[in-house]
């Protein structure tokens, strides 16, 4: 059986952890745009006494598995297997499309930032492909791309996705879990200070947002008695 993750970034506190936060980043290109800020958030969590883990699931980052061989179901199973190795109380912290694969985990709580449905993500990927094709002098439409996706892998925003991945993504919904804290970026009471990094054209870093993420997770976990 393949390992659930080829690489796991672990940031531990100086003392025994209060709990472990399993970070599930956004999917596809959005993961690259947010990774630096999520790592900063993990360090901020460690300063607050939490252990933090960020796994590279099959097809992600350091994984030796090609992305085209992976679908959402495999990611869900792999994430649950990573979580099963954690002995301390567990909080799953998912961002955007990461919330589509976090519900099989046995956790003490879930924290989600700006969760999004799979159909919305797929439309964004397809529109980006249509725009790229147009710039390259080729003609494509959402309809022709979706028809092709039934027969063969598609290259979408630099990601070669299998027909199974595209079909599952188009049907995927954010599943209910409990206890759950759902957060959103922006200014105001109950929101996470910062801008939607996943909308930027290039990877970025937002130290203030990272600190706000860590503080919100810590406050929410304490309110839920997860420690």
Image: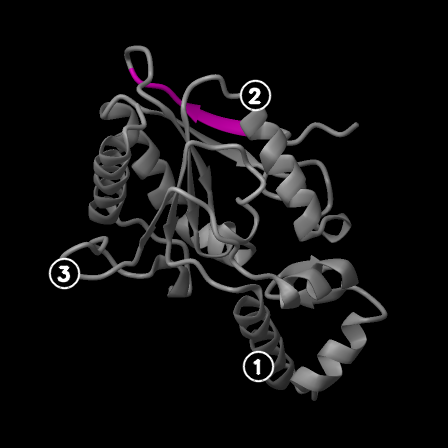
Distance from Cα at disc 1 to Cα at disc 2: 43 Å
Residue placed most toward the observer, 184 or 5: 184
User: What residue sits 64% from the left and 29% below the top?
Assistant: 6
User: What residue sits 27% from the left and 44% below the top?
Assistant: 213
Name the chief secondary structure element in magenta: strand
The location of residue 33, given as percent across then percent down, is 43, 54
Q: Earlier in the sequence, mark 1 or mark 2?
A: 2
Q: Answer yes or no: do the residues labelled 1 and 3 have beta carbons within 8 Å? A: no
Q: Is residue 142 left or right of residue 108?
A: right
The location of residue 201, given as percent across then percent down, is 42, 65
The location of residue 117, given as percent across then percent down, is 52, 64
Q: Compared to 38, does 171 lie above or below?
A: below
Q: Is residue 92 left or right of residue 157?
A: left
Query: Which part of the image, by quadrant, shows the N terminus?
Result: top right
Q: Which residue is mark 3?
A: 188
Q: Compared to 184, does 3 lie above or below?
A: above
Residue 14, image quadrant: top left
User: Magenta segment range?
Assistant: 8-13
Q: For label 2, count other residues whose C-alpha is less than 10 Å away and answer few (under 14), some (14-19) or many (20+).
A: few
Q: Which residue is mark 1?
A: 131
Kindly identify which numbered label has been placed on residue 85: 2
Residue 78, image quadrant: top right
Q: For the image shown, how many numbered marks are present on the structure? A: 3
Is residue 162 found inside the magenta-colored segment of the image? no
Front disc: 1 or 2: 2
Q: Answer yes or no: do the residues labelled 3 and 2 have beta carbons within 8 Å? A: no
Q: Earlier in the sequence, mark 3 or mark 2?
A: 2
Q: Secondary structure at mark 2?
A: loop
């Amino acid at each position: 059986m393949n390992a659930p993750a080829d690489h796991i970034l672990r940031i531990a506190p100086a003392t025994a952890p209060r709990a472990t936060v399993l970070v599930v980043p956004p999917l596809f290109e959005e993961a690259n745009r947010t990774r630096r800020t999520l790592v900063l958030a993990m360090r901020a969590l460690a300063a607050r006494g939490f252990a933090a883990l960020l796994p590279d699931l099959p097809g992600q980052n350091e994984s030796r598995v090609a992305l085209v061989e992976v679908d959402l179901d495999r990611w869900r199973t792999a994430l649950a297997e990573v979580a099963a190795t954690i002995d301390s109380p567990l909080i799953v912290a998912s961002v955007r499309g990461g919330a589509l694969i976090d519900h099989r985990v046995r956790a003490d709580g879930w924290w989600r930032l700006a969760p999004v449905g799979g159909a919305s993500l797929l439309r964004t990927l397809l529109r980006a492909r249509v725009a790229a094709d147009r710039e390259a002098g080729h003609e494509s439409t959402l309809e022709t791309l979706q028809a092709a996706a039934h027969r063969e892998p598609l290259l979408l925003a630099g990601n070669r996705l299998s027909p199974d991945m595209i079909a599952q993504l188009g049907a995927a919904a954010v599943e209910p879990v409990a206890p759950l804290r759902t957060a959103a970026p922006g200014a105001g009471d109950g929101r996470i200070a910062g801008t939607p990094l996943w909308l930027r054209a290039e990877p970025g870093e937002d130290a203030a947002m990272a600190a706000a993420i860590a503080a919100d997770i810590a406050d929410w976990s304490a309110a839920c008695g997860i420690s």
